[in-house]
Image (cartoon, rainbow, N blue to C red):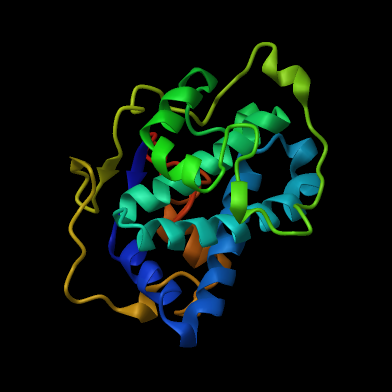
Amino acid sequence: MKLRQNARHFASRTALETPVVRSVAKSGLVRLHTRVFLKKAAPEHADEREAHLDDLFEATVDTYLRALNDGYSEAEAREITHIQANFDFYNHGWTEMMEFPADELEAHYDRYREFFERWDITIDEPLGQFKPPEGLTEAPSTPEQLEDPEHPHAEGGFADDVYVETESGELVVGGQEEPDDIDVSQAVGVRGETAVDADTDAGGDDGSSSEASGSSSDGSRD
């Protein structure tokens, strides 16, 4: 799939790996992703999905860190969490929130099959071993949407690799090298930005996201 990657993504990664700021960075990322995907949800269903999304993104941050620890690049680890979220959306029939079409679910799974199988992640069980013991907060499904799914925020054709859009707009296959001069204070949740600041920096008013989820007006995911 297509992601964005900029200095804030690397700063957020470093913050999550730094004990003194890990909790505030994680909270900031969860808030950001929930806010971003609620904008993609059908307005009449947004409120009822909020607590579920909070729990989901709390768990996918743990997946992100494990993927990094297992040797995946920043872009690959973040894409893994995007894929998990899209599995969850599909299972609930929340097709309007998906970032790639439903017919690409298997292709995205296959690219990370080794990681997914190691951690018991399937399309039906998106979190696998990262699912919290108490489970996720329940939210109503809309299974009727699966009969003729609509994906207003999805962009197909990028299932064969991770495609990264840089700050300059260049599309790079596989992601960028980690910079030498990472400023942790620029991480989501750490620098004390307002909700509007974070949302704009993450992809903007169209409801795109940052480190674990979202899409820009040109279809690239944050």
Q: Is residue 183 above or below residue 169?
A: below
Q: Residue at the spot x=48%, y=24% of the render?
A: 106
In the rendered image, which quarter contains the N terminus?
A: top left
To which quarter of the image does residue 126 belong?
Answer: top right
Q: Residue at the spot x=63%, y=29% of the render?
A: 90
Left or right: where 180 falls relative to 119: left
* Residue 207 visible at all: yes
Most distant residue in the front direction: 118
Q: Residue at the spot x=53%, y=62% of the render?
A: 62
Q: How many marks?
A: 0
**Viewer-proximal residue, 51 or 220?**
51
Most distant residue in the top direction: 148
Q: Residue at the spot x=56%, y=78% of the render?
A: 23
Left or right: where 8 falls relative to 54: left
**Viewer-proximal residue, 181 or 71?**
71
**Residue 153: x %, y % from top left:** 51, 31
**Viewer-proximal residue, 67 or 74?**
67
**Residue 127: x %, y % from top left:** 61, 47
* Residue 214 visible at all: no
**Viewer-proximal residue, 191 or 54?**
54
Q: Is residue 222 above or below residue 87?
A: below
**Residue 150: x %, y % from top left:** 60, 19
To which quarter of the image does residue 157 belong?
Answer: top left
